[in-house]
Amino acid sequence: MIDHKKPENSQVTDVPYPSHGGNSRAMAEISGTDPDKVIDFSASINPLSPPGCVSQLLLETPRLLREYPDPHCTLITERISESTKVPKDWIRVTNGSTEMIYLLPHLFHKGREVAIFDPCFSEYEKAFMAFGIKTHSVKLMANNGFQAHPSGLFPQLDKIQKLEAIVLGNPASPTGKLYTDFLPQLQEYCEERNAVLIIDEAFIDFSSSKNSAWNLLERHSNLILIRSLTKFYSMPGLRVGYGILHPEKIQKIAPRQYPWSVNALAQAVGSEVLLDKAFQEETRAWMHREGSFIFQALDSVGEIKIFPSDANFFLFRIQENIPPVGLYQHLLSESLLIRNCGNFKGLDESYFRISLRERGENQKLVDSISAYFCRRNYKK
């Protein structure tokens, strides 16, 4: 049995970095901190709680458990179509966006190649490699703010002889960078190469639907968008996502999707939260307010470099001469969990991602980071 009590001002040591964010209880067990006191900045989930309609729907759980889910996800598909203005036959609902990611390789041929603009969500590479599709990492560099310039990137893509698809986040994770201006040029390049453009828009709702690639590249047959409802609506436990792709592509992957993969409760909740306009407006106002607060506060800390973001999280880098594990352990000793990004291609352990939470918790994080570097400088 782990004793979660620790001496005042104690330091957590020898704690491994998790491979993904959002597993605060496991990290608390490993580090010996109280799991009920950990504030999780490692998972990019809306902290405003699910919309109010969810509480009422949960009361219907017994009824929903007695029924098979709609195998066609009819109602939630209609609601997604109404909210996004995307035709219903272009939408495929899945068990989280990750299920759609693992359906994508069925659209391509073994022996072909996929380019992934990194840093990027690691499951894309895993999914393609599992199906014998070779992946190439095209790295976007921190020293120019992860900008995407055709003059530097397209020659790298030209070298990939069997290119069949390109993957890019918009906003990207973990950088929070939007590529609205770059997407039309990338789309044109994909058309010339007869390649599919896959854009991960799991965080687009935190930004604005106006920034979606659907608006820029409407109804192109070689475009696939990956979306999530779990992050914006704060319900990762239910697993609801969807893909936007040409109906012919949907017909190709549909037989590969497990029957009833999206459960009845997930469909019911997902259908209702899409109607909550007040929650959507409140979330975007919160993100603008707290994002400005976090960025300005950490931008003033000389030992770190924080990057601008259009999502509900920020990426920052610690100066080269400062061991990153020290900050991580210090924060964890104060029950603050952040996401180390050393396992993202193109980044190393000096990079961390922090999600936005409510003001009191954000203030605690800022104060703890500032205090750590002040104490470190004092000891020099």
Image: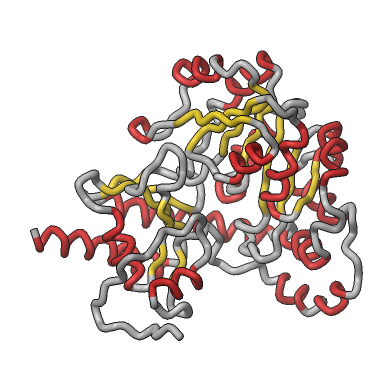
Q: Position of residue 246 (x, y in %)?
A: 80, 32
Left/right placement of residue 97 relative to residue 19 reads right
Q: Position of residue 66 (x, y in %)?
A: 90, 75
Left/right placement of residue 70 relative to residue 7 reads right
Left/right placement of residue 331 relative to residue 271 reads left
* Point 30% across, 57% down: residue: 325
Q: Is residue 360 visible?
A: no
User: Total marks drawn?
Assistant: 0
Q: Is residue 357 visible?
A: yes
Quarter of the figure that contains the C terminus: bottom left
Q: Does residue 130 sit above or below 191 in this rendering?
A: below
Q: Position of residue 241 (x, y in %)?
A: 71, 52
Q: Does residue 234 sit above or below 97 in this rendering?
A: below
Return the residue nearer the eye: 307 or 103: 103
* Point 82% across, 40% down: residue: 253
Q: Does residue 151 sit above or below 12 in this rendering?
A: above
Q: Position of residue 76 (x, y in %)?
A: 82, 55
Q: Does residue 8 sit above or below 282 in this rendering?
A: below
